[in-house]
Amino acid sequence: MRILVTGGSGRLGESVVQGLLQAGHDVVSVDLRAPTRHREHWFAADLTVVDEASWALARVRPDAVVHLAAIAVPFSRPEREILRTNTALAYNVCRSALDAGAGTVVVASSPTVVGYGAPTGWAPSYLPIDETHPVRPWNAYGLSKLMAEHVMRMFTAQAGDRMRLAAIRPCYVIAEDEWAGAPTQQGHTVRERLDDPALAAGSLFNYVDARDAADFVEVLLRRAEDVPNGETFFVGAADALAREPLAELLPRYHPGTTGIADVLAGTGSAFSNANAERLLGWKPERSWRTELR
Ligand SMILES: NC(=O)c1ccc[n+]([C@@H]2O[C@H](COP(=O)([O-])OP(=O)(O)OC[C@H]3O[C@@H](n4cnc5c(N)ncnc54)[C@H](O)[C@@H]3O)[C@@H](O)[C@H]2O)c1
């Protein structure tokens, strides 16, 4: 497959480019900035600009698009800018992909759509959280990711069988060098997140190895015809990024989970990969217990 990865120079993007190349695909990456690896596969464009997005898609004419480009960190820019940028990116990329005849588009969303951490309080309807769990984003980043899912579904309704679309909600992405001590997205190391549970509590202790997320994307692209058009998938590690069971940890940091978290057995995550396993036979292979150096 000829695959265009938007945001291919990012934390997740570099692993996705690497994984797709390893699987034998013809990969092109488009990003505002250059990647550290596979620079020869990259070109620059600002995909918030309509003409640049159409030019990028028309230039590559991919069979499939993996849309990762975004402002990926909540509150890293003014709220209005995050909402405007991420929504425009999702729309421009899906629109241009359809116009350029792409057969498949995968859009990156986020577990934050669920709304955990809201300053007004939050309680899950049930645990572990799956794709049917209600969404209630409380900041511009979470809202922009929900918008990206709606954009994805809008094009499903518009294009029907002309294009397969899906959204993925990757958990807190940990790239390969971060197991060896490089800072993670929030600035601290994996070990610091484990040593001080307050650091990972904000994201309900979720995480995924970037290579597992890349494997998932590869399987999804290859088997896009086998899943209902417009599907959404959580993509996370099987366990939680915590040394204690979540049945004990979650109620300490999220009082709304008291009682509800009792169902979480042992080292299990607060998020379910059951949809990915049921529809695609995908399971994560890596855990902090095997990867942390
Ligand atoms: N990292 C995580 O833990 C995580 C979790 C859930 C979802 N996500 C989502 O996954 C995707 C990738 O996340 P990441 O951690 O790799 O982010 P990142 O910030 O490392 O990478 C995003 C890339 O998008 C590029 N980009 C931003 N604006 C652009 C534009 N206008 N035109 C072209 N390129 C542009 C950036 O230059 C950057 O390289 C994002 O959509 C993010 O919201 C990430």
Image (spheres, grey):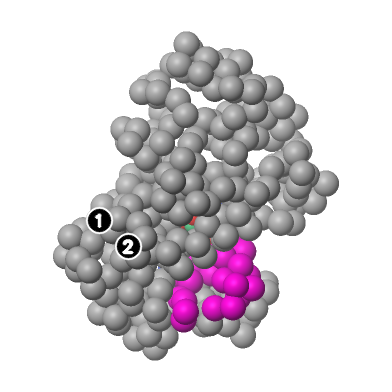
Residue highlighted by disc 2: 165
On the rendered structure, is 285 left or right of 44? Answer: right
> What is the number of the mark on residue 153?
1
Going by the picture, which residue comes out furthest to the left?
158
Residue 220 seen = yes
Q: Nearer the viewer, residue 234 or 59?
A: 234
Q: Distance between the residues labelled 1 and 2?
A: 8 Å
Please say whether residue 5 is one of the residues in the magenta stretch: yes
Count neighbours of disc 2 (C-alpha within 10 A) and say few if under 14, some if 14 to 19, many if 20 or more: many
Q: What stretch is highlighted in magenta?
A: 1-25
Is the CB of mark 1 within 8 Å of ligand 1? no
Residue plotted at (57% across, 60% down): 215
Quadrant of res 121: top left
Give the structural element (helix, strand or loop) at label 1. Answer: helix
Residue plotted at (67% across, 72% down): 36
CB within 8 Å, label 1 to label 2: yes
> What is the number of the mark on residue 107?
none
Is the CB of mark 2 within 8 Å of ligand 1? no
Give the structural element (helix, strand or loop) at label 2. Answer: strand
Quadrant of res 197: top right
On the rendered structure, is 26 left or right of 135? Answer: right
How many numbered marks have been drawn onto this rendered protein structure? 2
Residue plotted at (41% across, 51% down): 279
Residue plotted at (45% across, 61% down): 220
On the rendered structure, is 118 left or right of 252? Answer: left
Which amino acid, by three-letter code, is at mark 2? Leu
Vertical relation: 38 (above or below) 113: below
Residue 200 seen = no
On the rendered structure, is 68 left or right of 247? Answer: left
Which amino acid, by three-letter code, is at mark 1? Arg
Count neighbours of disc 1 (C-alpha within 10 A) and say few if under 14, some if 14 to 19, many if 20 or more: some
The picture places residue 144, in percent across and down from the top left corner, at 34, 50
